[in-house]
């Protein structure tokens, strides 16, 4: 099960830097997680100031 980033994302980039799989990238309005690359580790959720990454 992969994580996804909800609408609370403020595009700070903290999650991208912490993702060991490189599954997070900047999207048009917020960061996005590639579900196929996500390893469900939760590193992104731990560093996000708004709690945007959530398990799908």
Image: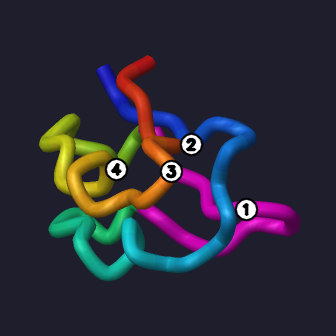
- Callout 3: few (<14), some (14-19), or many (20+) C-alpha neighbours within 10 Å? few
- Callout 1: few (<14), some (14-19), or many (20+) C-alpha neighbours within 10 Å? some
Q: Secondary structure at mark 1?
A: loop
Question: What residue sits right under mark 4 in the picture?
Answer: 37
* Cα distance between the residues tagged 3 and 1: 12 Å
Nearer the observer: mark 2 or 4; the answer is 2
Which quadrant is the C terminus positioned in? top left
Q: Which mark is residue 10?
A: none
Question: What residue sits right under mark 1 in the picture?
Answer: 30
- The picture places residue 29, in percent across and down from the top left corner, at 85, 63
Q: Who is closer to the viewer here, 47 or 29?
A: 47
Question: What residue sits right under mark 2 in the picture?
Answer: 5
Question: What residue sits right under mark 3 in the picture?
Answer: 50
Say which residue appears at 43% left-offset and 59% top-offset.
Answer: 49
Side of 23 relative to 6 (left or right): left
Region in magenta: 24-35
Side of 19 relative to 54 (left or right): left
- Callout 2: few (<14), some (14-19), or many (20+) C-alpha neighbours within 10 Å? many
- Callout 4: few (<14), some (14-19), or many (20+) C-alpha neighbours within 10 Å? few
Q: Are marks 2 and 1 in contact (CB under 8 Å)?
A: yes
Say which residue appears at 38% left-offset and 66% top-offset.
Answer: 15
* Cα distance between the residues tagged 2 and 4: 14 Å
Nearer the observer: mark 2 or 3; the answer is 3
Nearer the observer: mark 3 or 4; the answer is 3
Q: In the image, is residue 27 part of the stretch drawn in magenta?
A: yes
Q: Quadrant of residue 19?
A: bottom left
Q: Are marks 3 and 1 in contact (CB under 8 Å)?
A: no
């Amino acid at each position: 099960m992969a994580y996804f980033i909800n609408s609370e994302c403020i595009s700070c980039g903290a999650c991208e830097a912490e993702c060991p799989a490189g599954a997070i990238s900047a999207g048009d309005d917020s960061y996005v997680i590639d579900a196929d690359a996500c390893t469900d580790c939760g590193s992104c959720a731990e560093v996000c100031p708004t709690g945007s990454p959530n398990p799908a």
